[in-house]
Image (cartoon, grey):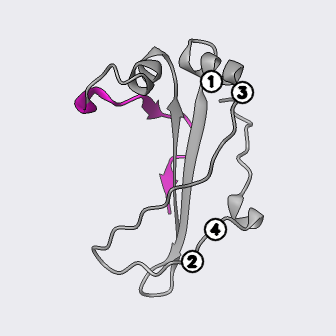
Amino acid sequence: MPDDFVFEDIVEQGSASSPVIFPRQTLSNAGRDIPLSNEEAKEIMGENRRLYVRSLTRYDDVFGEPHETSFCVRVGGPLLQKILQGKLGESQAFAFDVAQHYNYAT
């Protein structure tokens, strides 16, 4: 990912939610679909391209202080292709690595 790359803020696109999360509670979100052409998918599963996935969570703690946690991973390569084809067991299904940018907590 280039150093000057900027992710668009999905909050402004209206795809954000405002759930209440209590201590020790787990929250899951399915995200959104990303349409890819067959050629793009082949390049991501090959050596030419990668897909970057970012998660951003903004919240206020119990004292009303705002916080933000973000992580970004890079997905792709031949290992992803094997996983999608069901050729690896669950314990081996790890086809991403931490991206250089957008990993922080405040």
Distance of label 3 from label 4 (alpha carbons): 26 Å
Mark 4 or 1 closer to N-term? Answer: 4
Does residue 27 show up magenta in the picture?
A: no
**First reached walking from the N terminus: tag 3 or tag 4:** 4
Give the amino acid type for the residue marked by disc 3 in the picture: Ser
Picture coordinates of residue 15, whole percent (x, y)? 67, 64
Q: In this view, does 93 lie above or below 103?
A: above
| Vertical side of 74 occupied by 7: above or below | below
Label 3 Cα crowd, 10 Å radius (few <14 / some 14-19 / many 20+): few
Q: Which amino acid, mark 2?
A: Ser
Q: Mark 3 and mark 1 in contact (Cβ < 8 Å)?
A: yes
Mark 2 and mark 1 lie on one chain; the one further toward the N terminus is 2
For the residues labelled 4 and 2, say whether their Cβ atoms are less than 8 Å apart: yes
- Work out whether mark 3 precedes mark 2 in sequence or the reverse, and give the earlier one: 2
Q: SS of the residue at dot 4? A: loop
Quadrant for residue 6, please give it: top right
Give, as a single range, the part of the protein colored magenta.
Answer: 90-106
Give the class, few, some or many, for how many residues have Cα within 10 Å of label 4's Cα (few <14, many ≥20).
Answer: few
The residue at which mark 2 appears reads as: 18
Task: Give how far apart the Cα atoms at labels 4 and 2 are.
Answer: 7 Å
In the rendered view, does 68 fall on the left or right side of 33? left
- At label 4, which amino acid type do we have? Ala
Residue occupied by mark 3 = 37
Label 1: which residue?
Answer: 41
Q: How far apart are labels 2 and 1 at the CA level? A: 32 Å
**Disc 4: which residue:** 16
**Number of the front mark, 4 or 1:** 1
Q: Provide residue 80's location: percent of width, then percent of height.
A: 45, 24
With respect to residue 38, does 60 lie above or below? Answer: below
Query: Are discs 3 and 2 less than 8 Å apart at CB?
Result: no
Residue 24 position within the rendered picture, expressed as x and y whole percent measured from the top left: 27, 73
